[in-house]
Image (tube, helix red, strand yellow):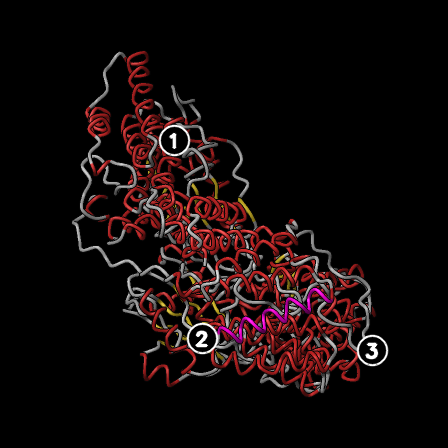
Amino acid sequence: MEFRLLGTVTVETLAGPLPLGPAKRRSLLAALVLSANTPVPVGRLTDSLWDDTPPSQARGVIQGHVSRLRALLVGADAEAYGVELATLGDAYVLRVPETLVDAQRFEELLMLAREQRTWADTALMLKEALSLWQGPALSGAFTGPPLRAAAHSLEESRLATVEQLARAYGELGEHHRAAALLAAETAAHPLRESLAAELMLALYRAGRQSEALDRFHRTRRLLADELGIDPGHELADAYALILRGEPGAGPGGPGPGLGAARGPAAALGSAPGPAAAPVAAPDPAGAPDPARTAGPARTSDAARPAAPAGAVPVPHPGHAGEPLPVDLLPRAPRGFHGRAAELAALTRAAAGEAPVCLVTGPAGVGKTALALHWAHRSGALFPDGRLFADLRGFSEAGEPALVDVLREFLLALGVAPRRIPESAPAAAALFRSLSDRRRLLVVLDNARDSATVRALLPGGTDCVTLVTSRHRLEGLIASDAARPVPLGTLEADDGTALLAGVLGEERVRAEPVAARRLAELCGGLPLALRVTAARLAGRPHWTLAALADELADERGRLACLDVDDTGVAAALRLTVQHLPPEAVHQFARLGHHPGGHFDPYAAAALAGTGPVAAAAALERLAAAHLVAETAPGRWILHDLVRLYARGLDPASAHEALTGVLDHCIATALAAADTAEPGGEPCFVLPDGYRKPAAVRDFADRAEAMRWLAAERENLALAAVAAREAGLEDRAWRIILLQWPQVVWRVRDNWAPLLELALESARAGKDAYAESRVLTLLGWVLTEEGRTAEAAAVLERSPVLAREAGDPLGEATALINLAVVQAELGELPTALENCGRAVELCREEEDRHTEMLGLQHLARMRLTAHRPQEALDCARAALDLGPEHEEAVRRSLLLAVCGEARIALGEEEDGIRLLDRAAQEAEKAGYDDGAVQALEALLRVSARTDYRRRYDAALRRLTDEG
């Protein structure tokens, strides 16, 4: 529940906004919320609801509005949130936790902003505060004089916050961003001189002096025409600073505003403190160049745009020094009931220094729901964000690698991928360092042991870690003073309340004894209660007593699942018995899915149907609470439900697995073809391949890359399942087809998965597959800096390709091998191998791979101080294109041409070509290439334009990773 004043006056609940009704009722609510937890006399409420003389029945009108508001709040379960509208004599008081009022959270964030010691953290707090505003304050209410004054005060606070955020941007060097922010507000408030002054300085520092001066003269004329006054000291001082061209106000300089302080805390009104040292920027020299090496079958390693569309589920910083808000929490659980004592215990436990809160209990008891409910309810306590990881300690899918969890945390905290350490200990150390000065909530769900949790604990004393586990984790209690919050089954009253939330109060009140008995028979497990309630909700003619009798009978006959409680098994059996056959068939096949989530296409492949029929079956299963939709078109099974479903039809396991594996192959083929069109296919389809009834269609590269990123874990689990089932021909194909994503995020720990593909290829004695996998694995190892290992891997790849009769595979392998040999100082051998690769491509008439080979050959000849041969080679490559996909590679070839011209003494032509190469790279969003070309330009030219463009490209590269 949330009370909103910063925009339309409303009360938001999990079921949507409350229907508050007329404007005067909203005015009454606004007046009570503005004075939350303080009695408000009827006289003051009267002033808020009427602008002139109130009617004689004003008191009765107010009483009617209060009565209706109270009913709405009670109906929305306000008591569970600590909300109460009470009458105190001749006054009313709205008792509400301050965290539920957006205006209070706004003020709290401003206070936190004043306490920050770095401008980046200050900007983060101020942005979070302004994000709470959804329009003019107190919109939708009739604003009498007291409310008008309150709305004006809130708006003044908002505008002051905008000015403070602009100053923070200036201190970070983001003058264009400060100007854009201020321009929008100045247009809405043209007579506010402080806004105009800040805008002038931001424009000037951004190199837009004429616009800054024009803003002064426009504001001066407006003040004279509208108010008959001259500019005040703020405008005049800003004008004078710009005219004098003082260094502090100049373009590119730091952004202290008029009367600026030494640090963010001082600038925002509190005592100044020492600024925290910023995190070092990533080193571009260590960044992988996607065009240095070849990919697997037809390498589009050069085709890496500025940002991978959807490659990461968590936000990255958009500009240097300014992390975006962090929130990895899944959505809050709906229909949460009870647990008041446990919620209070969590709040108490979280109040300590660097607390670790440990929620423990049996499977299905609602540990995750409790943790998420508390986390969402307590969001204002963690202004730096909330992190979440499912550690899958009790899942058959297996636990994620620690380094993968830490990678997602670090990405969410704004670390560029190239800065993330490869080892878990180093990544954990960086995570502790970054979290040291933040207020973060870290939710670690389904932890199996204490050691796993310890590696993921944040470093800050203001951080809270919330852990859920089926184990007691006594080691964590001993070593880290974890505060246990044991979670038992729901009490009968809370279980009955949960049933009433689904079935309605009237139906439960009609059979209170049967409702209580049902709650007891379900073992107090929320999962069992929800499934039972769903069955009753769909059958209004059923009595609760009849279902209780049936459930009791089944409870004695059903075999227990591999869990402590049989209530879940009983409820699931009864539910499945009443599903239509097609839904039962789909449900049974879902139990054999190897991954963590699925869509209608995967469900169809499992069941041997089409996606339309699968989607309809999933809807039926969701209505029975057997599956859950976590995002549009994305479904999951609870662990206990998966176990039950798998036992319904064990004989179909191999058929279902083969179907979903072939679905993975078909969809990954479509994604790879859309992401990197124009080349040869990676491989022929496996023996016995079952073409799915329908394959997902990808509109463009961005959509295909988003799918590959989102399905990475599922595809890895599918490959593991294929290997374990003896389907090696599927395993290596599923892994190899992810190569566009491997190329895009080459340092993202792909080696273990590729080693699994290599084992599968060798188990199937497939030379073609082994060669292709070795080629990609060798390239990944090269980009990870493991050059010697890469050379050992790549030595065998061309030989295997020849044995398999795969000349293009041999060419790609030779190119990758040549790159490694050049790095190891074996330049003559590298030149020979790269030349052989080019010859193979010409024999096969594959212009795409030939262009790649010539590009690397040109660079190697330049390194060997043979500039004329390098120039000839690069020209030959350019003559093969350009295709529209090759803009990035063209920029690299132009850069070689430019450097070769300079080496030949033709400096003017060389500079022109390098500039063109940089422009091509900038236009294509290829910052690696832009940095390379501009770096070469700066070696022979001191033009400030080149330096500015180089710095901008380097900043984009390090920020966006």
**Residue bearing mark 1:** 183
Nearest-to-viewer mark from 2 and 3: 2
Q: Nearer the viewer, residue 203 or 826?
A: 826
**Residue bearing mark 3:** 688
Nearest-to-viewer mark from 1 and 3: 3
Q: How far is the residue under mark 1 from the one under mark 3?
A: 64 Å
- Residue 498 is situated, as x and y percent measured from the top left of the image, at 58, 64
Q: Which mark is residue 881?
A: none
Looking at the rendered structure, the kind of residue marked 3 is Gly
Q: In this view, does 685 lie to the left or right of 774?
A: right
Nearest-to-viewer mark from 2 and 1: 2
Q: How far is the residue under mark 2 from the one under mark 3?
A: 47 Å
Q: Disc count in the image? A: 3
Dot 3 falls on a residue whose secondary structure is loop
Looking at the rendered structure, the kind of residue marked 1 is Ala
- Residue 445 is situated, as x and y percent measured from the top left of the image, at 48, 72
